[in-house]
Image: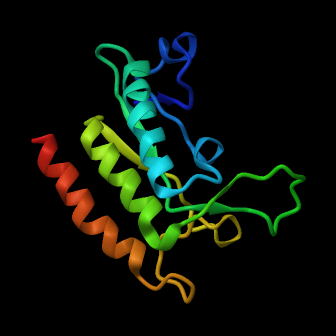
Amino acid sequence: MLVADSQDRAFVSIFDGASTYNITGQTHHKSPPEIRAWALAAYPKMIAAAGSGKISTVTIIPGYDDRKLWRLPPRPVTDRWGGETYRTLWQEAIAAAPDYILITSWNDRHEGSVLEVSVEYGSRILDTTAPLSREFLTQQR
């Protein structure tokens, strides 16, 4: 299986599906209600981009902040809002009913996308992931 990191039909047509690796460019500087509104509008488009018979995906993130890196501004920053960003995106992803939900994180502490237990965030993200992933999998049956 090969899934395109694109919503462009020209690319998706030669792959098995469509995805978007990092959504922080669309969620940056948004509050949880704004993130929910964005996801409510964007997730159906992400699913539709896959087309008929292809794998549909939507992407969620716990947050994102790379201001401590060498990259030049402007830099997208998606605040975690105490875990509300992640929870909101999960809820909208489940409601959109894609084939897969992708979580953008390599536990990159320098990009603020950490999922693992940390001093800064404790186990909040993992504690959120477990029940929401089960809910998603239950709906897939």
Q: Nearer the viewer, residue 6 or 79?
A: 79
Looking at the picture, how far across and down is residue 48, in whole percent? Answer: 38, 20
Q: Nearer the viewer, residue 75 or 19?
A: 75
The structure's colour scheme is rainbow
The part of the image, by quadrant, that contains residue 45 is top left
Residue drawn 48% across and 33% down?
19
Q: Quick check: 2 left or right of 130? A: right
Residue drawn 40% across and 51% down?
89
The part of the image, by quadrant, that contains residue 135 is bottom left
Quadrant occupied by the N terminus: top left
Q: Is residue 58 above or below residue 120?
A: above
Looking at the picture, how far across and down is residue 7, in whole percent? Answer: 53, 23
Q: How many marks?
A: 0
Q: Quick check: 23 left or right of 134? A: right
Q: Is residue 51 above or below residue 133?
A: above
Q: Quick check: 70 left or right of 26? A: right
Residue drawn 56% across and 17% down?
8
Looking at the picture, how far across and down is residue 27, in whole percent? Answer: 58, 47
Looking at the picture, how far across and down is residue 90, in whole percent? Answer: 35, 53
Q: Nearer the viewer, residue 109 or 128?
A: 128
Residue that protrudes farthest toward the bottom in the picture: 119
Quadrant occupied by the C terminus: top left
Residue drawn 34% across and 27% down?
55
